[in-house]
Amino acid sequence: MELSAATPQKIVVTGGAGFIGSHTVVALIEAGFEPIIVDDYSNSEPRVLEGLKTILGRDVTSFTIDCNDRAAMAEVFASGPIAGVIHFAAFKAVGESVEQPLKYYRNNLDSLLLLLELMPQFGVKNLVFSSSCTVYGQPEQLPVTESTPRLPAQSPYGNTKAICEDIIRDTVTAKTPVRAISLRYFNPIGAHPSALIGELPRGVPANLVPYLLQVAAGKRASLTVHGNDYNTPDGTAIRDYIHVMDLAEAHVSALKVLADADTDSFYDVYNIGTGRGASVLELINTFKEVTGIDLPYALGPRRPGDVEQIYADVTKSAQGLHFQTKRSLADALADAWRWQQTLS
Ligand code: WQD
């Protein structure tokens, strides 16, 4: 079945109530697709569906199931015809993966294996997989291209992403009728401009922007900058922060490329970032420019496992996906702050 945005092609979005998943649901509908959310809400909340309904002016079909549940997933595919799958559902807390590796290997690998078994049974050919720049570790050269060697993962979480990429590659090499693209995300931040959906961190946020937002909202006393002795212009670590709506739209671009693939078995990998690195201090300063808020922060020691700097070479995704980011770091921080204020 060829994908076309003209008639509403059904796209299964596993983890579709999550941070990146929910924003991708918006982008899919705006592109004329019909997303079907599959989520067990282990790391998201049903309120996301209300936010989506307000943004979209309509309900989105959703199934509250564990995407490791074979019978339940087969039912979803049977409700088709399904034109494609975007697979977000995975545990993604780096620290937790170090403490509970088997939980991560079991969940993150099994859910992909099940999809790859079910898709050919139901004639579903197109798969977009949520991967991560973490597979590069600390690259020798910057910016990283898709042919930059993957380094041994810094965490079991990161390893599950590398292993999943290899599982997809080998499945396609075996001529299984699957056309797949892995998107290696850099650092997704921000929220939908309506402030009706956004990131919902649980407990103490591990990631910089959600933590920074909670400090700005007065929920936490101060931000600790993990390391200012890196070999970077201001000594703090550099990342490629991409607006979550840009990242969401990259998934639509990937689906359209799969639609045009001229073989039944196809696999490719793309970096999805802005192509520009920003340091921790730059984020703090940009946040102040955008909101007027002077964040209290302290300089602390490096965080174990962190890479010094990584940002994407976006040439391939510009050429191969016809994808380019449209939103700035300031846009992302402004949208993130508007969302945080609704939480407070
Ligand atoms: C960014 C920078 C921190 C918190 C992680 C995962 C990666 C992906 C994105 C899933 C680093 C610094 C952070 C704080 C700080 N997740 N920092 N103070 O580590 O680049 O990537 O999230 O795919 O797989 O590894 O993102 O936001 O945690 O950190 O100084 O309170 O901010 O040291 O330099 P990271 P992050």
Image (cartoon, rainbow, N blue to C red):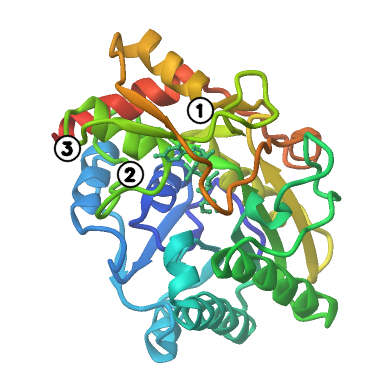
Residues 185 and 32: in front is 185
Crowding near the residue tagged with mark 1, few <14, some 14–19, many ≥20 C-alpha atoms within 10 Å: many
Q: Tell me which label, 1 or 3, sits earlier in the chain.
A: 1
Determine which residue is flagged by label 2: 199
Determine which residue is flagged by label 3: 343
Alpha-carbon distance for marks 1 and 3? 23 Å
- Horizontal side of residue 9 vs 337, given as left or right: right
Q: Quadrant of residue 174?
A: bottom right
| Mark 1 residue's CB less than 8 Å from ligand 1 | yes
Picture layout, residue 233 above or below residue 163: above
Residue name at image x 30 percent, y 55 percent = 60
Picture layout, residue 79 above or below residue 213: below
Q: Amino acid at mark 3?
A: Leu
Residues 14 and 4: in front is 14
Alpha-carbon distance for marks 3 and 2? 10 Å
Residue name at image x 29 percent, y 25 percent = 337
